[in-house]
Amino acid sequence: MTIMDTVIVGAGQAGLGVSYFLQREGRKHVVFERGRIGESWLAQRWDSFKLNTPNFMNSLPGLSYDGPEEDGFWRRDELVSYLQSYVESFQLPVQIDTTVISIERTDDQESFVVNTRSDGPIEDCVVCRSVVIASGSLQTPKIPSISSRIPDGIVQLHTGDYRRPSALPPGAIVVVGSGQSGCQIAEDLLAAGRTVYLCTSKVGRAPRRYRGRDIMEWWTEMKFFDVTLASLEDKSISRAPQPQISGTGRYGHTVSLQQLAREGVVILGRFRDVKENKLVLGDEAADNVLYADQFSQRMKDEIDAYIDNTGITLPPLE
């Protein structure tokens, strides 16, 4: 049994950032990571994947971005390399290949017992005063029950398992879901000459750049990311899909269902059922396109209002 001040679960951006501050304060702690540093980025992203946040936003405390393209977008492997360098630079106590299997309170309710397993049947435990869960919310694939009705001869692949178009068998491909990942994978497939059908739902889209700045720069300055759950009148907004956008290309690009359609993607409604070996689709595709358009316009209107209220001098509308 080991005694610690804090146990951190997960060696991604959040876990490493917390570890940095604990290390700086001389707090005895450990970071448990079930796989490698940045495991989710390594194991659940496709080959052409790029981050959707520009490089100036991706640095962690104490180690700023020092490259030539602040407005560019890291590839998956570039981010992982940065995370590994971060651990080495500050000698953070990360223990890889260690799975946390349970966290329980001690009898006096003043501490926690964290049980782990490291590449084998032997279990170990750490007693600590605090635990930080930094494992993220997207670690387990969400497979809808309807997938069980798809014929056995059809290859099914979750987003986290997709790597490249050439790994898929010949023939047309249906991408289910028009959020960030679905649209980006549709583009990846289309660029390889594949026939692509995209089942859509109500997902907003955002302009990659507007009035001379990346949308993320605007949202940072406007304190968009500082909004708390308690302050939201409509709490469901916190569960809304991330808006359609992409970091591919030198400075990323705007993603829209209309553009995907012009390039050859067949835009469909929601995937609702399978009957007699045929997909049953909803008829709301046009409504989903309109919803995305309205969301984008609302984002632009909010930025324009912010410019008017603050008196910022910027280039004219593009």
Image: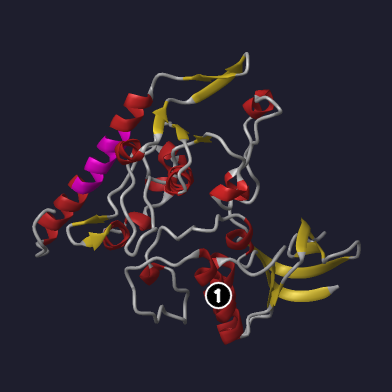
> What colouring method underlies this structural image?
secondary structure
In the displayed image of the protein, which residue is found farthest to the right?
121
Left or right: where does residue 255 sit relative to residue 91?
left
Residue at (38, 45) in percent of width and height: 243
Q: Nearer the viewer, residue 238 or 185?
A: 185
Left or right: where does residue 20 sit relative to residue 248?
right
Label 1 residue SS: helix
- Residue 247 location, x and y as percent? 39, 58
Residue at (38, 80) in percent of width and height: 67
- Residue 39 location, x and y as percent? 64, 63
Q: Quadrant of residue 22?
A: bottom right
Which amino acid does the dot numbered 1 rest on?
A: Ser
**Is residue 293 located in the magenta-colored stretch of the structure?**
yes
Q: In the rendered image, which quarter contains the N terminus?
A: bottom right
Q: Main secondary structure of the magenta part?
A: helix
Q: Nearer the viewer, residue 205 or 29?
A: 205
Residue at (36, 71) in percent of width and height: 56
Q: Quadrant of residue 27?
A: bottom right
Reply above or below: 62 against 285.
below
Say whether residue 25 is visible. no
- Residue 305 location, x and y as percent? 15, 50
Left or right: where does residue 92 sit relative to residue 118?
left
Residue bearing mark 1: 81
Q: Nearer the viewer, residue 115 or 52?
A: 52
Reply above or below: 12 against 140.
below
Q: Which residues are magenta?
A: 291-300
Q: In the rendered image, which quarter contains the C terminus?
A: bottom left
Say whether residue 54 is visible. yes
**Is residue 21 located in the magenta-colored stretch of the structure?**
no
